[in-house]
Amino acid sequence: QVQLVESGGGLVQAGGSLRLSCTASGGTFSVDNMGWYRQAPGKGREFVVLINCSDGSTSYTDSVKGRFTISRDNAKNMVYLQMNSLKPEDTAIYYCYARIQRRTGGPRYAYWGQGTQVTVSS
């Protein structure tokens, strides 16, 4: 069974930095893309960033452009999110996302991690 496991959340002051990591594991599979969503208290889950694991192309939500950077390690099925110049409004649970194909020619499914809390104090 494929699992996504995040790490790296925590408490930081405004202007500080955090680095999140996410590992996909569990059998043989190929990953189309990986990324991060977040959910702030009282709000719905929102898109943050996505990276194509084949060509490395990325897509960021406007509010994090220039502050967050996603990178990947395909050999380890890992993605990283470097978050700089953090703001209180970045406070949320951050969920790792991956679109994965379990076998060649088979369907692709979305997988989610359990979430990691990021809290930015003012």
Image (tube, rainbow, N blue to C red):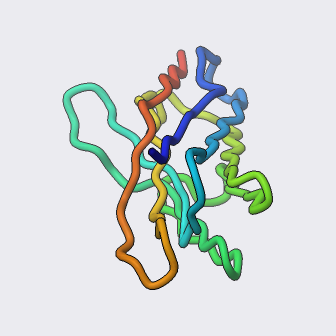
Work out whether 103 lies above or below 28: below
Residue depicted at x 42% and y 31%? 114
Q: Position of residue 20 (x, y in %)?
A: 65, 36
Residue depicted at x 69% and y 50%? 78
* Residue nearer the viewer, 104 or 60: 104
Work out whether 68 lies above or below 117: below
Work out whether 87 lies above or below 112: above
Work out whether 106 lies above or below 29: below
Q: Quadrant of the N terminus?
A: top left
Number of residue marks: 0
Q: Position of residue 5 (x, y in %)?
A: 55, 34
Residue depicted at x 55% and y 53%? 64
- Could you tell whether 38 is left or right of 116 in the image? left
Q: Position of residue 21 (x, y in %)?
A: 67, 38
* Residue nearer the viewer, 54 or 50: 54
- The answer to which quarter of the image holds residue 120 is top right
* Residue nearer the viewer, 71 or 87: 71
Q: Position of residue 107 (x, y in %)?
A: 35, 75
Residue depicted at x 75% and y 62%? 74
